[in-house]
């Protein structure tokens, strides 16, 4: 890449960064955007010399101090500033100052960009990777684990549960552990049929060692066309040696709601909500109607290992069980607070309930469970929830370059409880151990049944 082209690429990247900054301001609502007239004046004003610093060169000072009311060679006759006696002088000066600060701030960045292109040993360098790395580093410097950059592959993976189907092995996984770890195989999935279990760690894929590789990258190797095979090398607690599991991938459909009437307690309905997707409300309403049609007396709602989803879906789900009142508050950094209340028409607002939660219940799950607990609509049974009480905007970037996930607010329960990094403590704490899983027993569900029967007077 010649020097002129490198400079052009740098300018284009700068424009993309600035455009993204203003877009974020529109979404978050706390950045100042100048009025169009003032911005036009800024564009018509003399260009800032390349040598300008925050203190400014003499040329810059002269441009900054120019009285626009006395005439400007770039301003057309009749321009507002010509007839308003320099009314907008302060605004223009402020814009000059801002540009000067930005110019100085980004100088080390462009110097580094130039050094890499001129001196790095392996040329040519990948400009797209440099750009993505710069965005990732910028967001990581905020120190918020939920504000991050997702490249196109990661963005696709993050949206799989929301879109309802994909091709792979059919398992919920933890990508933040040392190795990609199975949280739970989906019912009737290839992962389930192959014998994978919660806690299984994927050490290698098709013989390739995954040590030290980010879990989000490992996921890409697990996904694949339906009908193809993948060999997973597994470490399992209690097993002395690693072992291979061959899984035949399939098209996986992910319903966000499962429901049935309990076999041993035909008066109790069971509804499991696995995610908060666009269709969750409709699936939930259908599930409630079907279990109610079987003359049940109460419902157990299972939110265990539900990592969350859309805020709107959480409000809609909570509204099916809470007839009225606040569901949550969104508390923004600028002091603004948004209040979200229950929607009318819920189908299970009076029937006795018990909710199941655990350490895998996060975000939207905690919004629902927190509202249920504060309204004293139902007791919670299980383990303390994950503790993700922040709100993110997912902003897709141009040209299919992934997305930026930005924390914009924290949410509070109806009683103004802070959940972030704390979680919700159940009314009844019950563990679910590996031994319980191996023995195919569920003490948390058993306790939920016991508590619900007590409500019913049995």
Image (tube, rainbow, N blue to C red):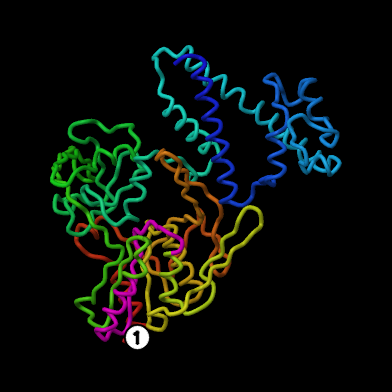
Find numbered disc 1 in the image and state the secondary structure of the residue it sits on. helix
Q: Is residue 233 left or right of residue 278?
A: left
13 left or right of 37?
left
In the picture provided, is 406 more to the left or to the right than 270? right
**Towards the viewer: 356 or 124:** 124
Give 38 or 402, whichever is nearer the viewer: 38
Q: Which residues are magenta?
A: 284-312
Residue 69: percent from left, percent from top: 84, 37
Residue farthest to the front, as pictured: 77
Q: Quadrant of the N terminus?
A: top left
Coordinates of residue 194 in the picture (x, y in percent):
14, 49
Q: Nearer the viewer, residue 301 or 9?
A: 9
Disc tally is 1
Label 1 environment density (alpha carbons within 10 Å; few <14, some 14–19, many ≥20): few
Instruction: Give above or below for 396 relative to 334.
Output: above
Q: Position of residue 263 (x, y in %)?
A: 19, 76
Instruction: Pick the quarter of the image with the C terminus.
Output: bottom left
Q: Quadrant of residue 184?
A: bottom left
Q: Residue at x 35, y 82 (%)?
A: 454
The residue closer to the viewer here, 189 or 262, is 189
- Asked if the magenta segment contains residue 256, the reply would be no
Residue at (27% x, 67% y) in the render:
258
Going 30% across and 71% down the picture, which residue do you hit? 271
- Relative vertical location of residue 67 with respect to residue 438 in this rendering, above or below: above
Q: Is residue 302 above or below residue 133?
A: below
- The answer to which quarter of the image holds residue 98 is top right
Residue 163 x, y percent position in the rendering? 32, 55
Task: Find disc 1 in the rendering and name its residue.
Answer: 456
Q: Residue at x 65, y 27 (%)?
A: 103
Relative vertical location of residue 151 with respect to residue 60 in this rendering, above or below: below
């Amino acid at each position: 890449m010649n020097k002129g082209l490198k400079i052009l690429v740098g300018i284009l990247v700068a424009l993309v960064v600035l455009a993204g900054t203003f877009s974020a301001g529109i979404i978050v609502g706390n950045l100042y955007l100048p009025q169009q007239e003032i911005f036009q004046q800024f564009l018509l004003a003399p260009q800032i010399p390349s040598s300008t610093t925050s203190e400014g060169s003499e040329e810059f000072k002269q441009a900054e101090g120019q009285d626009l009311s006395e005439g400007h060679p770039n301003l057309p006759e009749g321009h507002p500033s010509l007839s308003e006696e320099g009314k907008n002088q302060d605004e223009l000066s402020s814009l000059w100052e801002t540009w000067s600060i930005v110019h100085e701030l980004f100088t080390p960045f462009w110097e580094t960009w130039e050094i890499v292109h001129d001196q790095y040993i392996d040329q040519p360098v990948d400009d797209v990777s440099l750009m993505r790395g710069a965005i990732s580093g910028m967001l990581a410097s905020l120190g918020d684990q939920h504000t991050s950059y997702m490249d196109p592959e990661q963005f696709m993976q993050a949206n799989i549960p929301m879109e309802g189907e994909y091709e792979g092995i059919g398992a919920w996984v933890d990508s933040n552990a040392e190795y990609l770890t199975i949280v739970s195989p989906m019912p009737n999935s290839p992962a389930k049929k192959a014998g994978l279990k919660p806690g299984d760690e994927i050490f290698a894929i098709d013989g390739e060692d995954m040590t030290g590789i980010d879990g989000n990258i490992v996921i890409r190797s697990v996904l694949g066309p339906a009908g193809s095979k993948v060999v997973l090398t597994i470490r399992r607690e209690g097993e002395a040696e690693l072992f291979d599991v061959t899984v035949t991938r399939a098209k996986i459909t992910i319903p966000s709601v499962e429901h049935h009437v309990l076999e041993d307690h035909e008066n109790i309905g069971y509804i499991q909500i696995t995610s908060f997707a666009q269709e969750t409300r409709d699936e939930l309403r259908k599930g409630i109607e079907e279990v109610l049609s079987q003359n049940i007396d109460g419902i157990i709602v299972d939110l265990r290992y539900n990592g969350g989803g859309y805020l709107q879906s959480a409000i809609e789900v909570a509204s099916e069980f809470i007839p009225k009142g606040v569901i949550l508050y969104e508390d923004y950094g600028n002091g603004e607070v948004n209040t979200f209340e229950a929607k009318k028409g819920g189908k299970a607002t009076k029937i006795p309930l018990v909710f199941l939660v655990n350490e895998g219940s996060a975000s939207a799950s905690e919004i629902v469970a927190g509202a249920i607990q504060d309204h004293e609509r139902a007791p919670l049974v299980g383990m303390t929830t994950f503790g993700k009480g922040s709100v993110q905007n997912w902003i897709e970037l141009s040209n299919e370059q992934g997305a930026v996930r930005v924390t914009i607010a924290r949410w509070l329960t109806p009683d103004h409880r802070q959940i972030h990094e704390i979680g919700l403590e159940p009314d009844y704490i019950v563990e679910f151990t590996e031994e319980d899983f191996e023995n195919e027993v569920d003490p948390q569900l058993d306790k939920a049944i016991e508590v619900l029967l007590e409500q019913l007077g049995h």
